[in-house]
Image: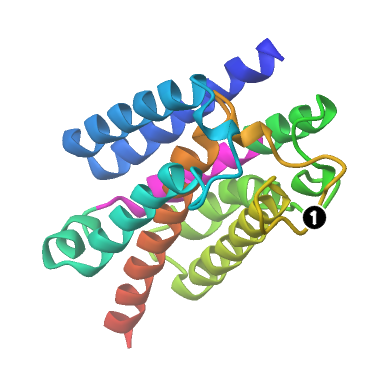
Amino acid sequence: MLFAAIIFILTVIISILFLYKASNSKTLLTTLIIWSITQSLIAYSGFYLLTDTIPPRFLLMVGPPLLAIILILTTKNGKRFVSSFDLKTLTLLHTVRIPVELVLYSLFLQKLVPELMTFSGRNWDILSGISAVLIYFLVIKKDKINTSLALAWNFIGLGLLLNIVINAILSAPFAFQQFSFEQPNIGVLMFPYNLLPAVIVPIVLFSHLISIKQLLAMKKQIQ
C-alpha cells in the first residue's frame, strides 16, 4: 500500500509539473500546490469519509476545480490565458493516466475501490495514456498537425475520462449510489487518493478542453 501511495503522489506532482510546463504560469503552479496541500490535509483528517451529509462533502473536493475551469474557459482573460498553452506538452500530460490506472488496480486488490473502476472492469482510460505517446509523435509533434485526428483523439479521451468519473461517482457510498454495493468506492475519499478527483482529473479534463479549443481554432484557420 505504501508503494502505491508513493507512486500516486509522484503522479500528482508530475501532473502539476506537466500543466505548469504547458502554461509557464507560476500563478497556476502556486494555486495547484496550495490546493493539493489543502485537500490532502482535509482528507487526512477523515473529513470525506463521512458520506451521509447533504450536500455531500465530496463537492468540496470537486466543485472548486470545476468552477475554476468554467471561469477560465468562458472569461475574456481566461480565453487569452489558455490560448498560450503548449499543445505538445498538453498531449504528453495524458501519459500520467497510465500510473493512475495501475494504482487504481492496486486499490482494487486492497478492496478500496470496485473492480469496475479498473482496466479489468469498465475503465479503459489507460488507453488514453498509452496512445498519448503515439499521438504526440505521429500527429502533434510534426510541423503540420493533423487537426482532425488530434481532435478525434481528444474527444475519445474525454469520453473515456467521463466514463470512469461517472462510474466512480455512482460507486461511491453516497445516497445516490448505483453500483458496487459489495465494494464501494472509498479509496478516493482517503489521502492521498483523494487527489485523483481533486487534482489529477481536473488537470486531465482541463488539458482535453484546452487542446480541443486550440485545435478547433487551428482547423478554422485552415478552412
In the rendered image, the residue lying farthest to the front is: 53
| Percent of width and height locating residue 29 | 26, 33
47 shown above or below 101? above
In the picture, which quadrant includes the N terminus?
top right
**Where is residue 141 drawn, in percent x and y?**
43, 52
In this figure, which residue is indicated by the disc labeled 1?
179
The type of residue carrying mark 1 is Phe
Q: Residue 171, percent across and down?
A: 73, 50
In the rendered structure, the answer to whether residue 212 lies left or right of residue 223 reads right
Dot 1 lies on which element? loop
Judging depth in this view, the residue of 169 and 175 nearest the camera is: 175
Q: Is residue 150 left or right of residue 134?
A: left
Depth check, front residue: 2 or 187: 187
Residue 17 location, quadrant:
top left
Q: Position of residue 191 (x, y in %)?
A: 55, 23
Q: Is residue 147 above or below residue 198?
A: below
The answer to which of 188 and 124 lies nearer the viewer is: 188
Q: Which residues are magenta?
A: 85-98
